[in-house]
Image (cartoon, rainbow, N blue to C red):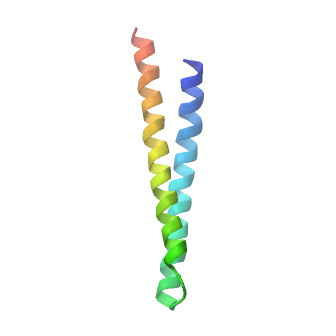
Amino acid sequence: MQQDKMLWLIKGVAGLLCVGFGLSVFGEALSRKISGEGWFWIGTLSLVLFNFGLCLMFDSHNHQLRMKQHKSD
């Protein structure tokens, strides 16, 4: 139970940070594309970070549900 709480907190915060960082990197890729510079790899990195952050947040939600299930038992 305590491990689920710790994983919930770590994965939730890390997920939020990755989503925010992925969106920031996406903004950089967008500005590079507009200015005509190379943008493909940084744009790919932004999508990877954003999707990884979403996966971490959804996984943290699973830990939260497991904690609620343990409380109801």
Figure check: 65 above or below 36: above
Marks counted in the figure total: 0
Q: Is residue 8 above or below residue 73?
A: below
The reply, left or right, for residue 72 in relation to residue 1 is left
Q: Position of residue 9 (x, y in %)?
A: 57, 34
Of 33 and 24, nearer the camera is: 33
Residue at screen point 49% across, 43% down? 56
Q: Does residue 37 sit above or below 61 in this rendering?
A: below
- Outermost residue toward the bottom? 36
Which residue is drawn at the image coordinates 45% and 55% (left, top)?
A: 51
Q: Residue at x 42, y 20 (%)?
A: 68
Q: Residue at x 54, y 17 (%)?
A: 1
Q: In the figure, 18 relative to 34: above or below?
A: above
Residue 16 location (% of width, % of height): 52, 49
Q: Horizontal and vertical percent for residue 2?
A: 59, 20
Name the image quarter holding the C terminus: top left
